[in-house]
Amino acid sequence: MSRTDSTLLATTAPADAGALLAPGELVHAGPGEAPEWWRDAVIYQVYPRSFADGDGDGIGDLPGITSKLDHLAELGVDAVWLSPFYRSPQKDAGYDVADYRDVDPLFGTLADLDELLAKAHARGIRVVVDLVPNHTSDQHAWFQAALAAPEGSPERARYIFREGRGENGELPPNNWQSIFGGPAWTRVTAGAGARPVTGAADEVPGQWYLHLFDSSQPDLDWENPEVRSEFEDVLRFWLDKGVDGFRIDVAHGMVKAPGLPDWDGTVSMVEGTETTDSAEDAEDVVDPGAPEDGSTGAGNSGPMFDQDGVHEIYRDWHQVLAQYDGDRALVAEAWVEPLSRLARYVRPDEMHQAFNFSFLTTAWSAAPLRTVIAASLRANDEVGAPTTWVLSNHDVVRHASRLGLENPSLRPNGIFAHEPQPDEELGLRRARAASLLMLGLPGSSYLYQGEELGLPEHTALPDDVREDPAFFRTQGAEAGRDGCRVPLPWHADAPGYGFGPSGKTWLPQPESYARYAADAQRGVAGSTYETYRAALATRRAERLGSGTLAWVDAFADSPDVVAFRNRDVVVLANLGTEPVVLPHGVEVLAESGPVVTDRSADPQVRVPSDTTVWLRAL
Ligand code: BGC
């Protein structure tokens, strides 16, 4: 479309800057100043195996992370969250922990962790570690002891072993399905010295054990006081080392409904996930609108999730953390809806933050975004907790690709090469706009490594390199999450794009990563990296994280524009197809893409489609 055409079609903002910038309905007053660091922090998720490789084995490690702390300091994040680096057979990339108090040799040593902590702290970066309490690895000493001991023993009582149903116990104790596909129960042989049944003629089958995830991840029994005290001790171990907080894996899953009743619903990483076989199908899916409570289908229900009893655990943990200085924090990974239900995890005596997956799963559409933003802030204000915002992590399709899908409200957990492919350019434009919208919101934001480079999902991974158990347990029906876990590109011209000294990478990188490499973007005006960096600096200078949110009246019902005021800054995201023409007299503080400014003495700003700007009155 030519410039003249777009002018004719442009959406025009109020004619004067005063009207544009005037605050409308106040949704959130903000704390003014954040009394604790985590209330307004930007926290960067490091997925250790894919961040940076220090020793050249093709798998990222702790020394690799330490070597890149200057990148994170330059980017301007407040904290990092490290996905698991503990001893683990790596059946689920470390979310299957065999020893909660040690570093897996793959990632380094405890001394490497100490060094990482010291060097991060020296740069003013806090460190949050991942805790996986719902299940252990089957290689954990406790599970090995449970198999070695007979039915009814205290060793078995740390896990959820049950007799089967049917005449000879040949049916699982209930009908639950694993989140990765297939049954959530595995049967072992009878008596002490048990092992998973194979069907061999001479074996005597015995009890079943529960695993909400892979069969190598047996669920712990959180009714057992020994389990509770063990994890309090694990918390203390890492708090003593100086970590600043914990991200709690599957925080909504530890307590199960009494009697483990059958349940006919479905469970998935992102419940409500829709898949489509063709672009035509996608066109038929209409935007479902936005329920008032901000629900998007990101919640899991059923007797294995969000049971009231789980909150007791967090009250105890809150007390453990309170014995340490430095405002240590707990963040819940809880796929729970509605947002008012999620807010229960962050009541004043429980956790400090919870990931806002309703925001992550909201369509790229103005009305649902306004709804989820308001519902999130209101639900958290009720309990005095900050809202968090997140667009990507190691379990979902990177938002630069998700938002480039024909219908961005479809949320597969991975994309195969034979499936409809995301539009890379559109996806990146929208991802940058979505990120700038997110970083302008009051509260705490989570970034996933590589999003500051605009990295797309790898959508053409050959099946023989995949590692995600979700791919295997669905017999290849789901691509799984490997595509968002590809090693980062640091140097455009180096082997493995500079991931490590040998050029080896545990997953192959797409050729497009040369364009996205950090060194190809550093210092380049308008690059995704410099856009994030500038946004983080402005966010800090304007104290947006502890600020306010009032809708801009002029766009309060707009089908195309989300606009709000945070302190003195107006954040305006244009999701429509036509540019938004801004009145004279506004200063652009940050932009997710180039805003066309004419060169006259009194310039006028046009915000193109899928672009976000931060503005202030001149
Ligand atoms: C983690 C996943 C992991 C699962 C089982 C989660 O929600 O984020 O990566 O596979 O828990 O631990």
Image: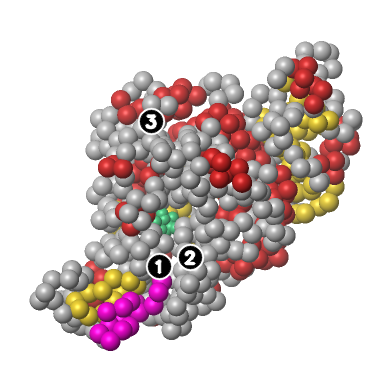
Q: Earlier in the sequence, mark 2 or mark 1?
A: 1
Quarter of the rendered image showing ligand 1: bottom left
Residue topped by disc 2: 266
Cα–Cα gap, marks 2 and 3: 33 Å
Task: Choose top left, top right, bottom left or bottom right for residue 235.
Answer: bottom left
Q: Residues within 10 Å of mark 1 (few under 14, many from 20)?
A: many
Q: Quadrant of residue 342?
A: bottom right
* Tag 1: amino acid: Gln
Indicate left or right for 128 with 365 as reference.
left
Q: Nearer the viewer, mark 1 or mark 3?
A: 1
> Which of pointers 2 and 3 indicates the residue nearer the eye?
2
Split into 4 quadrants, where in the image is the N terminus? top right
Q: Which mark is residue 177?
A: 1
Q: Residue at x 23, y 68 (%)?
A: 141
- Residue visible at 18% across and 68% down in the picture: 198
**What is the secondary structure assignment of the residue under circle 2?**
loop
Q: Camera-side residue: 323 or 297?
A: 297
The image shows residue 217, relative to residue 161, as above or below, that is above
Q: State the residue in front, 320 or 273.
A: 273
Element type where label 1 sits in the image = loop
Disc number for residue 510: 3
Q: For residue 176: magenta?
A: yes
Give the x, y percent position of residue 186. 29, 71
The answer to whether residue 314 is seen in the rendering is no
x, y (%) of residue 63? Answer: 32, 40
Q: Earlier in the sequence, mark 1 or mark 3?
A: 1
Residue found at x 51% / y 36%: 422
Q: Which residues are magenta?
A: 159-177
User: Callout 3, which amino acid?
Assistant: Pro
The Cα–Cα distance between marks 2 and 1, rounded to whole angstroms, is 8 Å
